[in-house]
Amino acid sequence: MIQAKVTLAQPLKSQRQFVAETGSGHHLILDDAAGATGAKPIELVALALAGCTAFDVVTMLRQKHHQKLTGYEVFVEADQAERPPQVFTVLRVRHVLTGMGIDKQAVEQAIHLSEEKYCSVGAMLKGNAKLETAYEINEEPVEWLKPGAAPEKVCA
């Protein structure tokens, strides 16, 4: 069971700032555009999608495909309906991977499996929104990651 709680931060003031607490005990501030002291709830939905697919893709690339990732970012842009409820209508997800010899087919398979099987956030959003996915792979020539290369010794 997933749990969440939000509490009005300053009940006697007119602001709409909340302290959010996850079931696992983590806290963050929620606010609206006027207060601008925390994330808007809808932004957290986009963030949840980015985080969900990131966990899936990195896990598959490292454990199943043994890829040497030195960096990974997921960017999400979402368009919303003009009228309430302003659900997401289009989600653009861009994966940016950095590493050595990253296999394009492994990346495509990991992203596909995340979208079609594993990412629960994406599965919930796909009912209302069109999902557009892109990725880029950046080669990073890190010498110490090459097979047979030993790290440089540092002398004090």
Image (cartoon, rainbow, N blue to C red):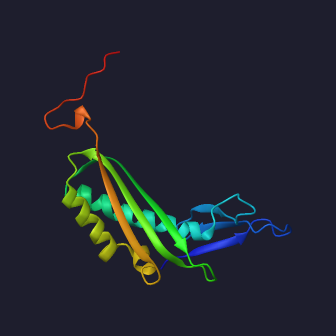
Relative to 149, say whether 87 is above or below: below
Dividing the picture into quadrants, the one containing residue 49 is bottom left
Residue 30 at x, y = what percent?
66, 65
Pick the quarter of the image with the C terminus.
top left
Left or right: residue 134 versus residue 14 is left
Instruction: Single out the residue that lies furthest toward the front.
Output: 82
> Residue 130: in sight, yes or no?
yes
Q: Residue furthest right?
A: 12
116 to 34, vertically: above or below = below
Q: Is 156 on the left-hand or right-hand side of 146?
A: right
Q: Is residue 64 visible?
A: no
Q: Nearer the viewer, residue 5 or 122?
A: 122
View extreme (top): residue: 156
| Number of numbered discs on residues | 0
Kindly indicate the quadrant of the structure image that contains residue 55: bottom left
User: For the point 25% across and 58% down, which residue is it?
Assistant: 61
Expressed as whole percent of the image width and height from the top left, the position of residue 91 reads: 45, 70
Q: Position of residue 39 (x, y in %)?
A: 63, 62
Q: Nearer the viewer, residue 135 or 112?
A: 135
Q: Identify the residue at image location x=61%, y=78%.
A: 82
The front one of 126 and 66 is 126
Residue at left offset 51%, top offset 69%: 78
Q: Residue at x 71, y 71 (%)?
A: 7
Residue 28 sits above or below residue 137 on the image: below
Question: At which x and y percent is residue 102?
Answer: 22, 50
